[in-house]
Amino acid sequence: ANAVDETKLKDALVADFTEVVVTASDSILLGDATDSGNTKRDTVQGILDLAGGGSWAHIETVVPSAATHVTFSGTPLSTTYKDYVVYFADIHGASTSKDLYMQVASGVGPTWKTAGYFSALDYRPYGTSTIQVNVANGSQYAIAGASYSGAGMGLCGVLYIHNRANDYVGWTCTSSNNYGDSSGQPGWGLSAGQAHEPNITSLRFHLESGINFGAQGYFALYGRIIP
């Protein structure tokens, strides 16, 4: 009688299991109030979506580590999330004054798009107080201008992809130069000749003229489901 108590249940059902870092795809058991309390399961992401109203989930962080490209591929942009954000900080070039660009891809391959980009970038040239607008078609999106190699002079910014299946791309960035000046660079992009960039599955960042990134800084990808 009374041999099985709360302590024994706790030790058997909780304490004896191996610890693990919870991920969005892990499952949780619950009692379904709409089905007579029957035991069901849902993913951690499903619980977060219900509780958080569409909060951002971290997908991947990539450190440049002196590479020529930073890539989010393997179809990280999927139907799991509707909107995506890339946050980048402390991005340097191996040499001074190199612009930051981005290309997009579709499919599992992925198949990188190398033409037909249209982007607009508002910026203040260093040493001036005049805001200029740079509008261009080409082989890539122009995300930010003039990365520098000196400490404390990296690029940082946020890039948005709104509604992956009908994609509009926007961004806002800041940068500093060797003289300590800084500039804000809001911009946007789409596919030339159409109103959106459909079904983006992969992103690739690189600096002007194939210059390597510096070893510091990072790019981080997040996704969100809008309820």
Image (cartoon, rainbow, N blue to C red):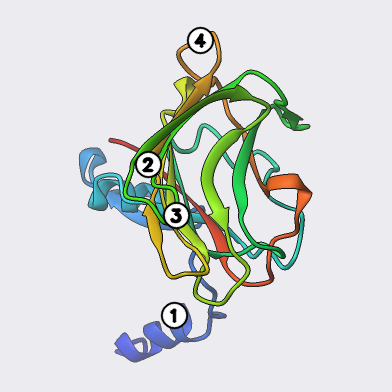
Q: Mark 4, residues whose alpha carbon is within 10 Å: few (<14), some, or many (≥20)? A: few
Disc on the earlier residue, 4 or 3: 3
Question: Can you give x and y, in whole percent of width and height, for residue 158 in the image?
Answer: 42, 50
Mark 4 vs mark 3, foreground winner is 3
Q: Residue at x 47, y 83 (%)?
A: 12
Question: Can you give x and y, in whole percent of width and height, for residue 64 in the image?
Answer: 68, 63
Q: Are marks 4 and 2 in contact (CB under 8 Å)?
A: no
The amino acid sitting under disc 4 is Gln
The amino acid sitting under disc 1 is Val
Indicate left or right for 179 with 219 as reference.
left
* Quadrant occupied by the N terminus: bottom left
Question: Can you give x and y, in whole percent of width and height, for residue 53 in the image?
Answer: 24, 45
Q: Whole-Å distance between the Cαs marked 2 and 1?
A: 50 Å
The vertical placement of 151 against 66, above or below, is below
Q: Name the residue under label 4.
A: 194
Mark 1 vs mark 4, foreground winner is 4
Q: Residue at x 70, y 63 (%)?
A: 95
* Quadrant occupied by the C terminus: top left
Q: Mark 1 points at which residue?
A: 14
Total labels: the figure holds: 4
Q: Whole-Å distance between the Cαs marked 3 and 1?
A: 59 Å
Mark 4 vs mark 2, foreground winner is 2
Q: Mark 2 points at which residue?
A: 186
Residue 149 visible in the picture:
yes
Q: Whole-Å distance between the Cαs marked 4 and 3?
A: 33 Å
Mark 3 vs mark 1, foreground winner is 3
The vertical placement of 114 against 217, above or below, is above
Q: Mark 3 points at which residue?
A: 126
The one of 33 and 168 positioned closer to us in this rendering: 168
Q: Which residue is drawn at 48% across and 67% down?
A: 22
Give SS at disc 1: helix
